[in-house]
Amino acid sequence: MKLGVPVTVNNLIEWTKVEILSPAHMSRKNSYIKTISTDSRTIQKGDFFIPITGEVYDGHEFITDAVNKGANGFVMQDKHVDKINKWKSSISPEIWEKLIILVSKNNLDFLIELSSNYIRKFNPIVIGITGSVGKTTTKNFIAGVLGEIFNIKYTPKNYNTEIGIASSILEIDSSTQFFICELGMRAKGQIKALSEAVNLDIGAITAIGPSHLEFFESVEEIAIAKAEMADFLKKKNGVLFLNNDDEWTDFITDRISCDVKRFGRNNRIDFNFIENEMDGFGRYSISFFEENRKITDVFLPVCGYHNIYNACCAAAICTYLGVLPEALKHGLEDAVLELNRMQVFEKNGKIIINDCYNANPPSMKRAVDTLKQISVKNSSRSIAVLADMFELGKQSEKLHYEVGQYTGKKGIDVLVALGKLSENICTGFYSVKDKNRSSFKKKDVYYFRDKEELKANLGKIIKKGDTILIKGSRANKLESLIECF
């Protein structure tokens, strides 16, 4: 990855707690680092290698490979210093003498400190989005609007970890006016640390729900952890945007003291919307208002009622920043959104809702809502193809069961479930009694453990004229099912 502006080894020493390995390498202090990589597989000539210790692999195992591919140096954690002679023996003396070799306490911390100091060098306005659902879409809406007017950088795809955010920051240069990032979370204190690292000015919490329960005991713990964003915003005199219609918003506001702006349906809040009409693909025409003053009408390029909230959050932030109505409308309508996220299209006489990038209980329920709305609009049969959700910890079976119940209560015509955990979705679906039927018949539910078996049978289940939702966690890779329709 190319840095927006090259930095010197001296910069690294000043900004972080690294040291040069030995006096023999002191002559490298004024050397410039122009490109970095955390992945030895993608090393290019001249890259500076930052090996990260992960759950499966330790990047230090690939230092020799990185150097032999052309890396101009590396930083290593001090616990690996005893391996220096082993690495040195595998690298030619001519190359070894020219290497930039630094030592850190922790390479991930080094990368975060580097990016944190780097962003403060240029001081763009930083917008950070967190929440259990909607982070990526909201970020992309904001980028779509601001990118039409300003020079911006933003985290690509769903790069919301320390590595992804830091790597994106290092692409900033002196022309960057805004940096827009997604802040992910798997532990208490992580949002607070990321807010500090990116030098946050404006924050947003899209919604709170039961995601990543493998790492938290309750949704209340998740809400408290997400609200850590407010601690840094208070120091910075920044502002936090909250979804007024989320059940956890009052809980959060009672515990924070930074400036807060609310968005949602209520016309007595800072920024609100009215939905006007939905087309046959589940896309809405909406009107936005700031303190009861109409801003603009927008036709959203993505399906789903829940995406109105993501667009409203983006519109509220951009209006707060002074974006004019016409630019807001144009930016939202032309925003480039991610693949496999609420993409709706027609194929062979069927309407497909492809939302298979990832899944948690709130996003599953929102997707089921969208399926129902589109099928009703088109008077079609509704088919929910749902697969396992991961990282839900001890509550996993219960939460899958509740998704099944929710799907049944919504009156979805057919459930197709995939994966070991999704057997609980079937059980929840069966448990619901419909007004028009004493209970769901066995033919309403199809359960598969194996994806290839599912693919072989989909053609027998789905008919022309159906509306089909595909949804599951990323590991399921459900996009491969689309070829079956």
Image (cartoon, helix red, strand yellow):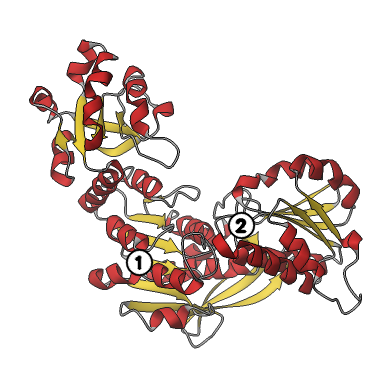
Question: Is 305 displayed left or right of 5 in the figure?
Answer: right
Q: Is the C-beta separation of discs 2 and 1 under 8 Å?
A: no
**Residue 437, picture quadrant:** bottom right
Q: How many numbered marks are there?
A: 2
Counting from the top left corner in percent of width and height, residue 365 is at 66, 67
Image-based side of 326 in relation to 361, left or right: left
Of labels 2 and 1, earlier in sequence is 1
Q: Position of residue 299 (x, y in %)?
A: 63, 65
**How many residues crowd mark 1 within 10 Å: few (<14), some (14–19), many (20+)?**
many
Classify mark 2: helix, strand or loop: loop
The amino acid type of the residue labelled 2 equals: Ala
Q: Quadrant of the N terminus?
A: top left
Q: Amino acid at mark 1?
A: Ile
Residue positioned most to the left:
23
Tell me the residue that label 2 is attached to. 359
Using the image as rendered, state which of residue 400 and residue 244 is in the foreground. 400
Question: What is the number of the mark on residue 303?
Answer: none
Q: Is residue 354 visible?
A: yes
Q: Is residue 292 left or right of residue 437?
A: left
Query: In the figure, 31 relative to 355: above or below?
Result: above
Question: Between residues 395 and 221, which one lies in front from this camera angle?
Answer: 395
Q: Residue at x 42, y 28 (%)?
A: 42
Is residue 270 visible to the viewer in this orientation of the structure? Answer: no
**Based on the displayed image, in which of its 4 quarters is residue 40 positioned?**
top left
Q: Nearer the viewer, mark 2 or mark 1?
A: 2
User: For the residues marked 2 and 1, what is the alpha-carbon distance in whole angstroms?
Assistant: 27 Å
Q: Position of residue 247 (x, y in %)?
A: 53, 80
In what element is the residue under mark 1? strand
The image shows residue 204 at horizontal and vertical percentages of 42, 68
In the picture, the disc for residue 202 is: 1
Residue at (45, 79) in percent of width and height: 262
Q: How many C-alpha atoms fall within 10 Å of the one at disc 2: few (<14), some, or many (≥20)?
A: many
